[in-house]
Amino acid sequence: MKFEELIKYIETHLTEKINYNELAKILAVSEQSMQRIFVFITNMSLSEYIRKRRLSKAYEELKSSDIKIMDLAIKYQYESETSFSRSFKNMFNMNPSECRKSNSEFIQLPVYQFNQINTPFKYSYKIEEIEEMQVYAYKTPYTETREDFLYKIRELYQNLKDIGLFEKIVNLGMYGITFRKDNNTEMYYVGCKEKLENSEQITIKAGKYAVFNCSGANQSDIAPLIHNIYTQFVLSTNLDIDLNYCFEYYEKNDNCYLYIHIKN
């Protein structure tokens, strides 16, 4: 399993600067696609996983050796003892010195084990070429963690319902659009083709898309399909998939189509 190879690579390079390009090569996808796949499989960002694994190893060494805190910080790729201590405290609610003196039990984020219960799924899709279109939308603020990002999306939908815009957007043909920029900032927009109050104009670019029928418009229908696409389809296809650019289109009959951009 390619993803298990990726996890093993991370684990054997925790004391070095980890080359994300090498991780992408293991999955045979682009660097940005690799990071998105990682999020969908583990429900945390790649950088968060690496940070927590390094801190978990540092915790062990603090409790089982006399290594200096400064040396430990350097070993696990921190620029200073201060930044290491701050990160350590955020994870374990105590600084390294307190950890060393305490009688607390060992705390760790374990090495990720791929869930083999996720059996291969059968999928069908079509390739569709669309023209550039303008959508007027409302967006989520950027968040650093996947959990916060999903919460902000749910909050955005609820806010639109509270101010009476959600039903209007649905009746006009609703789009849910995910953009991921070069700096890994991910944004989610909800909108339609008609300009509404305080909406922001964004462009859905022309090109070829792989189109999946979600067979429903609820998150319980869409989320499993998206997860399977990102963790299985992308690793199985020869299409050059652009995971940084996709959108959902919701029909009035409570059906949803997921469009994933194909490069070139």
Image (cartoon, grey):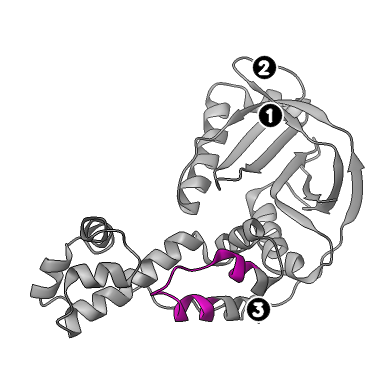
Label 1 with label 2: CB-CB less than 8 Å:
yes
Q: Earlier in the sequence, mark 1 or mark 2?
A: 1
Type of amino acid under label 2: Leu
Where is residue 55, by image quadrant?
A: bottom left
Dominant SS of magenta comes to helix
Front position among marks 3 and 1: 3
- The residues bearing labels 2 and 3 have C-alpha atoms spaced at a distance of 45 Å
Place of residue 189 in the rendered image (x, y in percent of width and height, measured from the top left): 63, 34
Q: Tell me: residue 34, above or below residue 133.
A: below
Q: Earlier in the sequence, mark 2 or mark 3?
A: 3
Q: Secondary structure at mark 1?
A: strand
Place of residue 176 in the rendered image (x, y in percent of width and height, measured from the top left): 68, 38
- The residues bearing labels 3 and 1 have C-alpha atoms spaced at a distance of 37 Å
Where does label 3 land, which residue?
2
Place of residue 19 in the rendered image (x, y in percent of width and height, measured from the top left): 53, 67
The circle on residue 196 is: 2
Front position among marks 2 and 3: 3
- The residues bearing labels 1 and 2 have C-alpha atoms spaced at a distance of 9 Å
Place of residue 249 in the rendered image (x, y in percent of width and height, measured from the top left): 77, 40
Q: Secondary structure at mark 3?
A: helix
Instruction: Tell me if 250 is positioned left or right of 138 in this view.
Output: right
Label 2 with label 3: CB-CB less than 8 Å:
no
Instruction: Tell me if 229 is positioned left or right of 138 in this view.
Output: right
Read off the magenta span: 7-24
Type of amino acid under label 3: Lys
Q: Residues within 10 Å of mark 3 (few under 14, many from 20)?
A: few
Nearer to me, 240 or 83 = 83
Where is residue 53, by image quadrant?
A: bottom left
Where does label 1 land, which residue?
191
The circle on residue 75 is: none
Q: Tell me: residue 200, above or below residue 214.
A: above
